Image (cartoon, grey):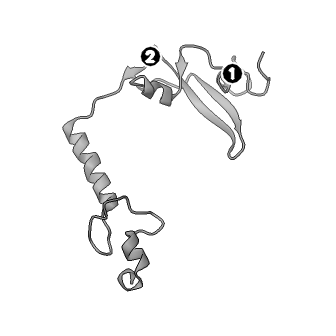
Amino acid sequence: MPGPRFWDPDGARYGIPTYPYRLAPDGLATRRQLRARGLRPGGQPVVAQILWQSRRCGVRAACLYRLDLAQPVRPMTPARWAAVAKALAARRWCPCCRRDAGYTLPTSLGTCLTCAESPALAA
């Protein structure tokens, strides 16, 4: 039997069925696992969770969904592809020199690397 800390298949302690890392029953999957299979939750509620201890973040959680209720991922339409391309292009546009930098601008700088290094252009 797994350790008692995160083992709660009845949901008495955590409110929903809870399992330790890598011990979820068959037929349940996380969002990433669903996506790897070309599926999405499709509006279904969370049916269980996985809890594990992380050194950096303390206790982490992952929601579990039923595989039999999952729906296929919606295909990207040409309009959605265009919207994504436009959003990514906006992240490459330098407000200082008004050019496409060719890479995503660092949010810490807010400008391209050339403008960030040049004190005359940054002012």
Q: Residue at x 43, y 20 (%)?
A: 70
Q: Residue at x 37, y 58 (%)?
A: 104
Residue that numbered label 1 is attached to: 11
Q: Position of residue 26 (x, y in %)?
A: 57, 13
- The answer to whether one can see residue 41 in this image is no
Q: The residue under label 2 is which amino acid type? A: Leu
The part of the image, by quadrant, that contains residue 68 is top left
Residue that numbered label 2 is attached to: 69
User: For residue 68, which numbered disc appears in the image?
Assistant: none
Q: Position of residue 121 (x, y in %)?
A: 35, 82
Q: Is 82 left or right of 21, judged from the image as shown?
A: left
The part of the image, by quadrant, that contains residue 2 is top right
Q: Is 53 left or right of 25, judged from the image as shown?
A: right
| Above-or-below relation of 72 to 108 | above
Q: Is 65 left or right of 74, judged from the image as shown?
A: right
Q: Secondary structure at mark 1?
A: loop
Tag 2 or tag 1, which sits nearer the N-term?
A: 1
For disc 1, the neighbor class at 10 Å (few under 14, some 14 to 19, many from 20) is: some
Q: Is 31 left or right of 72, judged from the image as shown?
A: right
Q: Position of residue 79 (x, y in %)?
A: 20, 41
1 and 2 marks in contact (CB < 8 Å): no
| Above-or-below relation of 29 to 88 | above
Disc 1 versus disc 2: distance between alpha carbons? 21 Å
Q: Position of residue 83 (x, y in %)?
A: 25, 47
Q: The residue under label 1 is which amino acid type? A: Gly
Which corner quadrant holds the C terminus? Answer: bottom left
Q: Secondary structure at mark 2?
A: loop
Which corner quadrant holds the N terminus? Answer: top right
